[in-house]
Image (cartoon, rainbow, N blue to C red):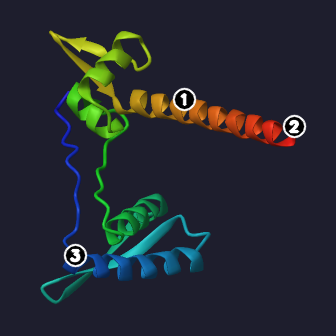
Amino acid sequence: MTSTDIRPVKLPDDKRQAASQALTKVRAHLAEHQDASQIQVTVRDSGDREPLTLPREVVELLASLLAHLGAGRAVSIVPSVAELTTQQAADMLNVSLPFLIGLLDTGEIGCRAVGSHRRITESSLLEYQRRDDLRRRQVADELGRLGQEMGRS
């Protein structure tokens, strides 16, 4: 499998407003055409205009990208079948490499060996994130419940 480049893209300040303005137009079009499964846009190149038809899902993804980029956040797109290095996976989870290695060693995140290296699928990372988020919410709910009980006594 080819290597995956997950370097984030961040717009310079002078282009953020253009992204925000485009987002407003894209959202308005999606709202006005809620039943459309495809969206037609016009691409202008050197004065020539060419129609381009895109699946609605692609335009919705574009809207999400514009929202993040317009807000000054960096964005990476990673295919769900992508295999990441341990460093790339640690970066995506915003954890240290030793912490990620511990998760791999305990089986919290699935991986496969490629020679002496490990590769982690993006889907394995997302599954771990979902489980971890659920655990965090349950702990927060329990702490809230205990706090309420203690406040009543």
Q: Residue furthest front?
A: 153
- Residue 86 position, x and y percent, is 24, 25
User: Residue 21 lies in what quarter of the image?
Assistant: bottom left
Q: Earlier in the sequence, mark 2 or mark 1?
A: 1
Q: CA distance from mark 2 to mark 1?
A: 34 Å
Badge 1: how crowded within 10 Å, few (<14), some, or many (20+)?
few
Kindly tell me whether residue 51 is visible in this rendering: yes
Task: Determine whether, in the image, residue 57 is placed left or right of residue 5.
Answer: right
Mark 3: which amino acid? Asp
Give the residue displayed 24% in from the left and 26% down from the top. 97
- Residue 89 position, x and y percent, is 29, 32
- Residue 53 position, x and y percent, is 38, 69
Mark 1: which amino acid? Arg
Mark 2: which amino acid? Ser
Q: Which residue was labeled with disc 1? A: 131
Q: CA distance from mark 3 to mark 1?
A: 36 Å
In the rendered image, the vertical position of residue 131 relative to residue 140, given as above or below? above
Q: CA distance from mark 3 to mark 2?
A: 53 Å
User: Residue 75 lies in what quarter of the image?
Assistant: bottom left
Q: Earlier in the sequence, mark 3 or mark 1?
A: 3
Give the residue displayed 35% in from the left and 36% down from the top. 93
Give the residue displayed 74% in from the left and 39% down from the top. 147
- Residue 71 position, x and y percent, is 36, 69
How many numbered circles are shown? 3
Element at label 3: helix
Q: Residue furthest bottom?
A: 47
Q: Which residue was labeled with disc 3? A: 13
Give the residue displayed 22% in from the left and 58% down from the top. 9
In the rendered image, the vertical position of residue 65 relative to residue 45, given as above or below? above
User: Residue 54 lies in what quarter of the image?
Assistant: bottom left
In this rendering, which labeled residue sits more in front, label 2 or label 1? 2
Element at label 1: helix
